[in-house]
Amino acid sequence: MPLLRVSLICLLGALGAAPPVSAAPAKPRGTVVFVANRATAKASRAVARVIRSQLADVPVRFQVVWVKRLPGGLAAQVVAARRVGAKRGALVVLWCNHPSVDQVFLFITRFREGRILVRRVDPSRDGVLGRFEAIGAIVRSGVGAILAGARIGVKPPPPPRRAAPPRTVVPP
């Protein structure tokens, strides 16, 4: 019995003798900016918390930029995202659009390339928090792919050109 006890003590001592090896935090390789909408502040705060958690071990800085309201239309939102990204020196800018209770769209843009990834995040069996977790996982996956050198999303079509006003012909 004493031999078993000594063996057990030695084993436990060996397991706990050295502190766990932890790598030094990696130097951030860019900034991820989440454009949060004050019109949906409660949901935006929850999404920001989940994204921050999902990116905790990814070598990026995470910032939240609050706007009063997202502009209407995707083209205007992309322009606003480009402005925010340029001002913050961002690698990626992302935002959510909530056209209805059952629909949430996540937009991830690598604005320097002009590419955008759009994902519809459907309601979850786990409720609202499940949907937010899905958003966080999509962001983590997209940012990880970008850091690995992959291209995500597509180039959006150029905005429609405004037609020139019709010429009026004045009879001589």
Image: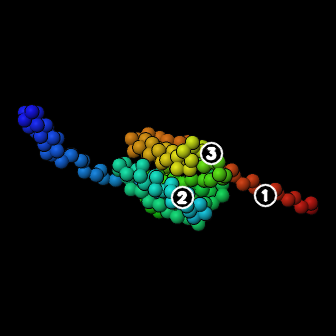
Q: Residues within 10 Å of mark 2 (few under 14, many from 20)?
A: many
Q: Residue shown at 69%/52% (left/top)?
A: 161
Q: Nearer the viewer, residue 121 or 18?
A: 18
Residue 157 is marked as 3
Quarter of the picture holding the C terminus? bottom right
**Residue 165 numbered mark, or none:** 1
Of residues 105 and 154, the one nearer the viewer is 105
Please, what secondary structure does the residue beneath circle 3 have? Answer: loop
Q: Which mark is residue 104?
A: none
Considering every residue shown, the one lying at the far front of the view is 1
Q: Which mark is residue 44?
A: 2
Label 3 sits on what residue type?
Pro
Residue 48 position within the rendered picture, expressed as x and y whole percent measured from the top left = 48, 56
Residue type for callout 1 = Pro
Q: Position of residue 85 (x, y in %)?
A: 48, 58
Disc nearest the viewer among 3 and 2 = 2
Q: Position of residue 103 (x, y in %)?
A: 63, 48
What residue lies at 62% left-to-right and 57% top-to-bottom?
76
Residue at the spot 12% in from the left edge and 40% down from the top edge: 9
Q: Quadrant of the N terminus?
A: top left
